[in-house]
Amino acid sequence: MSDSYAVIGNPIGHTKSPLIHGLFAQETGQDMRYVAIEGPLEPAQAFADTVKDFIAAGGKGMNVTAPFKLHAFAMADERSERAALAGAVNAMKFENGRVIAENFDGVGLVRDIEVNLNQPMAGKRVLVLGAGGAVRGALLPFLAARPAQLVIANRHVDKAKALVEQLALNGSLSACGYAELESMEPFDLIVNATSASLTGQLPPVPPCVFSPHATAYELAYGKGLTPFLRLARDAGVQGIADGVGMLVEQAAEAFAWWRGVRPQTRAVIDRLTVPLN
Ligand code: ATR
């Protein structure tokens, strides 16, 4: 029988994960099946019960998406440092009766930016908008990429400051509100990790943050030219991208973790890309 994997979320109808992992399995010749599971929203214990049922039926691993990333964190027996900092889990491996938890969102994002978009972050000025779960997951991998400056801007500045303090690091990481961005030097990479684009909104980011050669990255995907990407383009930015590459790269990280073989991502990204114009 082939090894069994799944993505769990609610709703889950629009997930691309079975397609992505199916293509990876085909390309690498792995004998596995990968399905989508709509997890129960309540009672609270029902999520863990669903995962345990999947394990009991021989399941080897799961991806986890909204709204269960915190539930998965809570039920894990072991958590990676990245998952611990994020307080959230997007991939689980089931081994010897234990649930091992990871968070590949941040590494997937860094890989998309540095490898696919060919924009190494070392020595660059990087601005991240937002201080929610998506940013928590990205911070350690971002710092590991050694930017000259990493600034986190959020409407609720305290949330961004708390994140920075949690990392208790050197001067290259700082937090601020949107108004303070007006008086800062422009940035080389600006990542919109707020949830504003999901509702067609624009974070109050001033156009002066974009340097002429900047890359503007929208974490959301499949939404075309979001208000944030439009702002960047109107500010003269040539390099704009959405999160489809991150989606595929985090999937590739999970696949490599589960199967011990790294799939190619380019063709899969191309297949899923929705034009931005
Ligand atoms: P996620 O897990 O997707 O990051 P989240 O934890 O709910 O979601 O965080 C949402 C983030 O988007 C927050 O940083 C939020 O800013 P606040 O913490 O100040 O509320 C940000 N956000 C949502 N809508 C926004 C908007 N219209 N403009 C600016 N920031 C927005």
Image (tube, helix red, strand yellow):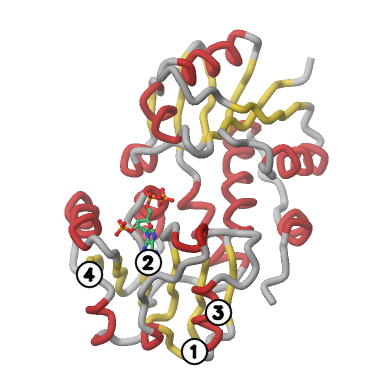
Q: Is residue 161 left or right of residue 191?
A: left
Relative height, residue 226 to residue 68 (above, below): below
Q: Earlier in the sequence, mark 2 or mark 4?
A: 2
Q: Which mark is residue 230?
A: 3
Callout 4, which amino acid?
Answer: Cys
Q: Earlier in the sequence, mark 3 or mark 4?
A: 4
How packed mark 3 is, by other alpha carbons closer than 10 Å (few <14, some 14-19, many 20 or more), is some
Callout 3, which amino acid?
Answer: Arg
| Whole-number angstrom distance, CA of label 1 to CA of label 2 | 17 Å
Relative height, residue 86 to residue 131 (above, below): above
Ligand 1: give its quadrant: bottom left
**Residue 140, horizontal then vertical, whole percent:** 35, 53
Q: Is residue 176 left or right of residue 102?
A: left
**Residue 20, horizontal then vertical, whole percent:** 72, 44
Q: Earlier in the sequence, mark 3 or mark 2?
A: 2
How packed mark 2 is, by other alpha carbons closer than 10 Å (few <14, some 14-19, many 20 or more), is many
The residue that disc 2 covers is: 128
Relative height, residue 140 to residue 270 (above, below): above
Callout 2, which amino acid?
Answer: Val
Q: Earlier in the sequence, mark 1 or mark 2?
A: 2
The residue that disc 4 covers is: 176
Q: Residue furthest top?
A: 56
| Whole-number angstrom distance, CA of label 4 to CA of label 1 | 22 Å
Which marked residue is nearer to the observer: mark 3 or mark 2? 3
The residue that disc 1 covers is: 235
**Residue 128, horizontal then vertical, whole percent:** 37, 66
